[in-house]
Image (tube, rainbow, N blue to C red):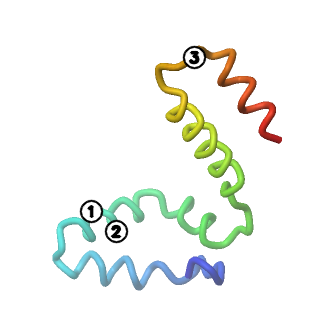
Amino acid sequence: MLTGLHGDRPGGWIVAAQQAGLPGITSFANGLTRDMDAVTAGLTLPHSSGPVEGNVNRIKMLKRQMYGRAGFDLLRKRVLLAY
């Protein structure tokens, strides 16, 4: 479903997950049914937030490396000069 962009398939999986009786899986499946439009769009449309998440992850890593060493000015320089 995820790699093939098959947004029409999660219905059967959700029903099976709700009937499985596992608390974590059932709760997750119930959450998916509450926002089925977003789930279908996420599994159908080719858009991805991967590049944005990668940049956020990189900036957080830089921030952790510099913890307690300097202020915002040095962090800003490291982020901007990395490219």
Q: Is residue 78 above or below residue 83?
A: above
* Mark 2 lies on residue: 29
Q: Amino acid at mark 3?
A: Ala
Tell which of 81 and 45 is nearer to you.
Answer: 81
SS type, badge 3: loop
Q: CA distance from mark 2 to mark 1?
A: 5 Å
Q: Amino acid at mark 1?
A: Ser
* Mark 1 lies on residue: 27
Q: CA distance from mark 3 to mark 1?
A: 43 Å
Sequence-wise, which precedes: disc 2 or disc 3? 2
Q: Which mark is residue 70?
A: 3
Sequence-wise, which precedes: disc 3 or disc 1? 1
**Closer to the eye: label 3 or 1:** 3
Q: Amino acid at mark 2?
A: Ala
Q: Is residue 31 above or below residue 60?
A: below
Q: Position of residue 2 (x, y in %)?
A: 57, 77
Q: Quadrant of residue 42?
A: bottom right
Tell me if 65 is positioned left or right of 3 in this view.
left
Q: Position of residue 9 (x, y in %)?
A: 52, 83
Q: Quadrant of residue 26?
A: bottom left
At a point 26% along the width and 62% down the height, the residue shown is 27
Q: Is residue 49 above or below residue 4?
A: above
- Circles 2 and 1: CB distance less than 8 Å? yes
